[in-house]
Image: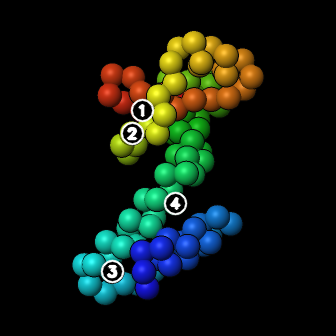
Amino acid sequence: MTQEEIYAAVDDAVAPVFRNVIHMNGDVAIDRVLNAYERVLKDLPGDSVCGIYARSDNTRGVSKAPANELVVGALDVEDDVDQDSHELLNPRGVNIIRRFCGDMRV
């Protein structure tokens, strides 16, 4: 399979929120699958956000909003949002993942 075919297969499987098991042999094949997952998951921050809510609920209780929480495992954000844009989006219920001191935070 080409890299694009692997990406399409992973994207089709991940979109409906299936949990996937893929068996690959060889370093090149494994790298292709991992690259496809990284590409698909880059556009799906929902799992990370759900994990943040769960971690906050478990450690602080459900009455504490998960603000300024670390996104564990995040490598970068695709677009930086400045304070002015954040102040416009936040009152509209848009939660932004932002970079603070090198960390990604919700």
Q: Residue, x 56% and y 24% (percent of image)?
A: 67
Q: Residue, x 57% and y 68% (percent of image)?
A: 11
Image location of residue 79, percent across then percent down: 48, 34
> In the shown orientation, is residue 106 left or right of residue 103?
right
Nearer to us: label 4 or label 1: 4
Q: Which residue is mark 4?
A: 40
Q: Earlier in the sequence, mark 2 or mark 4?
A: 4
Quadrant housing residue 103: top left
Q: Which element carries disc 1, helix, strand or loop? A: strand
Question: How far, Cα to Cα, is label 4 from label 3?
Answer: 17 Å
Q: Which residue is mark 2?
A: 76
Q: Are marks 3 and 2 in contact (CB under 8 Å)?
A: no
Q: Amino acid at mark 3?
A: Ala
Q: Are marks 2 and 4 in contact (CB under 8 Å)?
A: no
Question: How far, Cα to Cα, is label 4 from label 1?
Answer: 19 Å
Q: Residue, x 59% and y 18% (percent of image)?
A: 85
Q: Earlier in the sequence, mark 1 or mark 3?
A: 3
Q: Which element carries disc 2, helix, strand or loop? A: loop
Image location of residue 80, percent across then percent down: 47, 28
Q: Amino acid at mark 4?
A: Val
Number of marks in picture? 4
Q: Quadrant of the N terminus?
A: bottom left
Q: Nearer the viewer, residue 17 or 76?
A: 76
Q: Residues within 10 Å of mark 4 (few under 14, many from 20)?
A: some
Q: Amino acid at mark 2?
A: Asp
Q: Residues within 10 Å of mark 1 (few under 14, many from 20)?
A: many
**Numbered mark located on residue 48 in the image:** none
Q: Earlier in the sequence, mark 4 or mark 1?
A: 4
Q: Which residue is mark 1?
A: 104
**Numbered mark located on residue 29 in the image:** 3
